[in-house]
Image (tube, grey):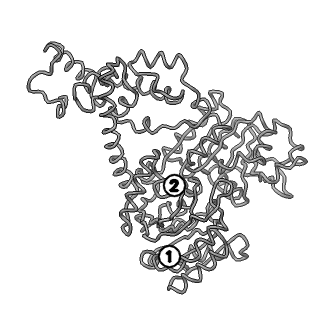
């Protein structure tokens, strides 16, 4: 099985991190981008070098899926460590293991600490729980790879307590742009569902409270769905089994062919197959289908289980992002949840790295309620709006800087001038990134013309130094050139070549430090 270019790069990056002596590293791929195939190929190389490999997961479906993909991709068979089955004494070098089984002291005690050379954690955002940590602590000499779909910043910060690095991340926008996932259109439904009375438990909304809050709106939601989903294959996520069953009945009353599945459904496999075949056009579930279930023909997702957890939201939407013949986009229905809290996940949460851009995009989508909008276009518009606001704020800041006659460039001015949204929106994830900049980093930044006092952490300092080094190699303008020319009114000097800026500064110097006639700084573009 051939890897796609980004999958090959991901595999190389993982081994590169381990080669540097980093023991615990992360791989982040959106749902539908083949993370199981990547770790199957990583497993193959580990076995080839003599390792025993443990694939660790918290659900039977994920273990079966991993074993199946590893066999199809590499031909390697897997032993199982779950309930009555054990890998001890097996010829197989790969084990798929249930964390619930392995965490037991008696079970874990049967294994020498060095039994596994590599551990791969599927759905790694679960790995901070005591059960996972007990297993990982026992095999503390093993190399560890955590694999997860795009986590939220809170998740990344938490994962940064255990993992030492992020080996590779492939983003949803990149996957859509490169044709590996379906484009997504968000449709905001102008129906305000009141969540103000919903409590919080374990950092997210209480499912029981959401079910109660949702109940009075179910008929109206079904009516809205009838306008947009009749000709689509739709999955609906709800907070409770009883709410899911009630909504299935309401949808059937509106002319849909709806089915429902939950953890207790004895006919779950048959219902899922029937939905896949097209016998049903809506599938209601109470958070059962967030992981380990694929049906590429799904072209509409309705999230009626509001959440603050971005990784959970991504998992729900991810059930509809896979490509399928005849499917040109995924329709994502988004309701106007009315809540006193503003941290609720929306379509913007799937694509925006910057919180300010996400807020603006959500606001824009709400203003366009009733119209479906491509989320990439929406993010671009929101980014432009935010950049425009930031440029206005920057203009004021530059005025203040002129008065202070600083010799060094403010990092924000540098980032805006070179149009580096990844720098201006950067948030540290790992422990070392959150530490203050080192004296060595501060001295290097100052030498290169950047004011180090405004750089808040070591991660940002490292990124700035890396960007400055790359710009030097590419022959682009220096921070000092940017500061001088932009203080004279020239625009986006950060995108110019070093030599063009030098020639212009020489001309200004020769003209007694005045702008030569015929040059308008606001419209000037180097030849």
518 displayed left or right of 19:
left
- Work out whether mark 2 precedes mark 1 in sequence or the reverse, and give the earlier one: 1
Q: Which residue is mark 1?
A: 221
How many labels were placed on the picture?
Answer: 2
Looking at the image, residue 332 lies above or below residue 176: below
Name the residue at 57% across, 74% down: 283
Q: Residue at x 65, y 43 (%)?
A: 146
C-alpha span from label 2 to label 1 = 22 Å
Depth check, front residue: 231 or 93: 231
- In this rendering, position of residue 519 left or right of residue 142: left
Name the quadrant containing residue 484: top left
Q: Answer whether labels 2 and 1 touch (C-beta < 8 Å).
A: no
Residue 482, how many percent across, how many down?
Answer: 30, 25
Give percent across and percent down for residue 104.
Answer: 86, 50
Q: Quadrant of residue 407?
A: top left
Q: On the image, numbered disc 2 is attached to which residue?
A: 342
Q: Residue furthest left?
A: 518
Q: Residues within 10 Å of mark 1 (few under 14, many from 20)?
A: many
């Amino acid at each position: 099985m051939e890897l796609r270019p980004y999958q090959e790069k991901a595999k190389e990056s993982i081994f590169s991190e381990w080669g540097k002596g980093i023991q615990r590293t992360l791989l982040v791929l959106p749902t539908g981008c083949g993370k199981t195939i990547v770790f199957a190929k990583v497993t193959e190389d580990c076995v080839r070098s003599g390792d025993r490999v443990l694939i660790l997961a918290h659900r039977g479906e994920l273990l079966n899926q991993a074993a199946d993909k590893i066999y199809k991709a590499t031909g390697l068979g897997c032993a199982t460590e779950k309930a009555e089955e054990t890998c001890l004494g097996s010829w197989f070098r790969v084990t798929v293991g249930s964390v619930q089984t392995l965490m037991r002291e008696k079970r874990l005690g049967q294994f020498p600490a060095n039994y596994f050379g590599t551990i791969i954690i599927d759905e790694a955002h679960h790995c901070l729980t005591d059960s996972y940590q007990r297993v990982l602590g026992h095999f503390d000499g093993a190399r560890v790879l955590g694999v997860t779909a795009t986590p939220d910043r809170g998740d990344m910060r938490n994962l940064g307590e255990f993992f030492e690095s992020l080996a590779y991340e492939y983003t949803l926008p990149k996957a859509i742009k490169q044709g590996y996932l379906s484009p997504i259109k968000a449709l905001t439904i102008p129906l305000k569902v009141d969540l103000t009375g919903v409590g919080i438990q374990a950092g997210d909304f209480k499912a029981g409270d959401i079910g109660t809050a949702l109940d009075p709106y179910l008929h109206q939601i079904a009516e809205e769905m009838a306008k947009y989903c009749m000709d689509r294959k739709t999955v609906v996520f709800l907070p409770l089994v009883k709410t899911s069953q009630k909504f299935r009945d309401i949808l059937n009353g509106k002319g849909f062919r709806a089915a429902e599945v939950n953890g207790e459904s004895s006919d779950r496999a048959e219902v899922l197959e029937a939905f896949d075949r097209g016998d049903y056009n809506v599938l209601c579930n109470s958070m059962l289908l967030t992981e380990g279930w694929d049906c590429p023909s799904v072209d509409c997702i309705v999230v009626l289980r509001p959440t603050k957890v971005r990784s959970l939201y991504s998992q729900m939407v991810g059930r509809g992002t896979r490509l399928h013949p005849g499917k040109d986009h995924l329709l994502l229905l988004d309701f106007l949840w009315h809540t006193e809290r503003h941290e609720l996940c929306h379509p913007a949460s799937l694509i925006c790295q910057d919180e300010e851009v996400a807020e603006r995009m959500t606001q824009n989508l709400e203003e366009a309620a009733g119209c479906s909008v491509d989320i990439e276009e929406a993010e671009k518009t929101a980014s432009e709006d935010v950049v425009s606001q930031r440029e206005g704020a920057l203009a004021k800041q530059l005025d203040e800087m002129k008065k202070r006659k600083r010799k060094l460039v403010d990092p924000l001015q540098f980032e805006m001038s070179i149009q580096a949204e990844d720098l201006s929106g950067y948030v540290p994830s790992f422990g070392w990134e959150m530490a203050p900049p080192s004296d060595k980093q501060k001295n290097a930044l100052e030498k290169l013309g950047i004011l180090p006092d405004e750089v808040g952490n070591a991660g940002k300092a490292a990124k700035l130094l890396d960007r400055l080094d790359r710009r030097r190699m590419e022959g682009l303008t220096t921070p000092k050139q940017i500061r001088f020319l932009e203080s004279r009114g020239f625009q986006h000097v950060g995108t110019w070549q070093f030599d063009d800026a030098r020639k212009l500064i020489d001309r200004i110097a020769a003209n007694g430090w005045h702008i030569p006639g015929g040059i308008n700084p606001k419209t000037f573009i180097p030849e």
